[in-house]
Amino acid sequence: MFSVKETAELTQLLRAAARAEILPRFRNLEDGAIRSKSGPLDLVTVADEAAEALITSGLTRLFPGAVVIGEEACASDETVLGRLAQAELAIVVDPIDGTSNYAAGVPLFGVMAAVVSGGEVVASVIHDPITDHSAVAVRGEGAWSEAADGSRQQLRVASVVAPGNMTGNASWRYLPMAVRDRVARNLTKVAASWDYRCAAHEYRVLASGHCHFLIFNRLMPWDHLPGWLLHQEAGGYSAHFDGSPYRPTDLDGGLLYAPDRASWQALHDTLFGE
């Protein structure tokens, strides 16, 4: 397992990377510092790459033998992702989640990491560089928001309500066409939906009880492992669209999050029903 103390070291490393490589470049990116990867909606900046390099170096020093799986490393070498399944201890890193916001000067982005041991997510951190607060979870120890001075506030998911009173985000961009049309049509049956273009902040809002649901289809581990554990330890329930449990190596099958299993089923029937 991964201890609370070790998770604190991970949190401090993400904070240091944000202070050294991310914040100084925010709204200060030079020409040529932004480029697209797989397409115009998939951006990377020099800050992403510099932060990942700093974090990777720090993780290698703090946790010798751990396999580091960074989003930008995987973009350069697709074989890196394959190491997750075999690793005894792996740390998955998203140096800047919400790069489109970051590149546009919008202060909604985060630094995320998740620790996978024995095929299970055992710790995670979602750090907000702007507020210098981190959302932290350790398997079996709960989830909390932590300020730079170390003060904490426990996180808990929202109370159970009927789907018509739920708010949240359905990220429909990667949904199959038939499912996307159905979900988009049925979103009129919930109270409200929104999109931050940043899973880091969407997961923080979910785990702190300020919304009820999230829906994702494309499941890259750096985007979802940190928030998945945060939501679990805050008392929430999630599963693939077919009801099966999520595993760290799953890249498809979708994810639906809700406050508990009964509300998950009610929301699933509402959004995915004909």
Image (cartoon, grey):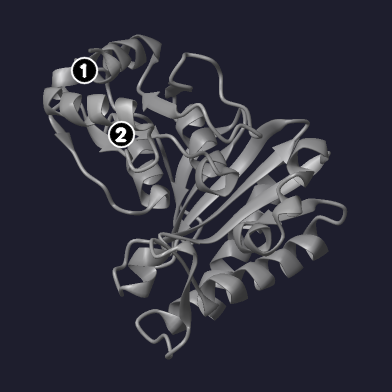
Q: CA distance from mark 2 to mark 1?
A: 12 Å
Q: As displayed, is residue 81 above or below residue 64? A: above
Query: Local crowd at mark 2 within 10 Å, few (<14), some, or many (≥20)?
Result: some
Give residue 161's mark. Answer: 1
Which secondary structure, mark 1?
loop
* Residue that numbered label 2 is attached to: 209
Q: Is residue 257 left or right of residue 11?
A: left
Q: Is residue 43 visible?
A: yes
Query: Which quadrant, please, contains the N terminus?
Result: top right
Q: Amino acid at mark 1?
A: Val
Image location of residue 40, percent across then percent down? 39, 65
Q: Amino acid at mark 2?
A: Gly
Image location of residue 31, percent across then percent down? 42, 90
Q: Is residue 218 left or right of residue 178?
A: right
Q: Considering only order in the chain, which callout, 1 or 2, is on the residue closer to the N terminus?
A: 1
Image location of residue 192, percent across then percent down? 14, 34
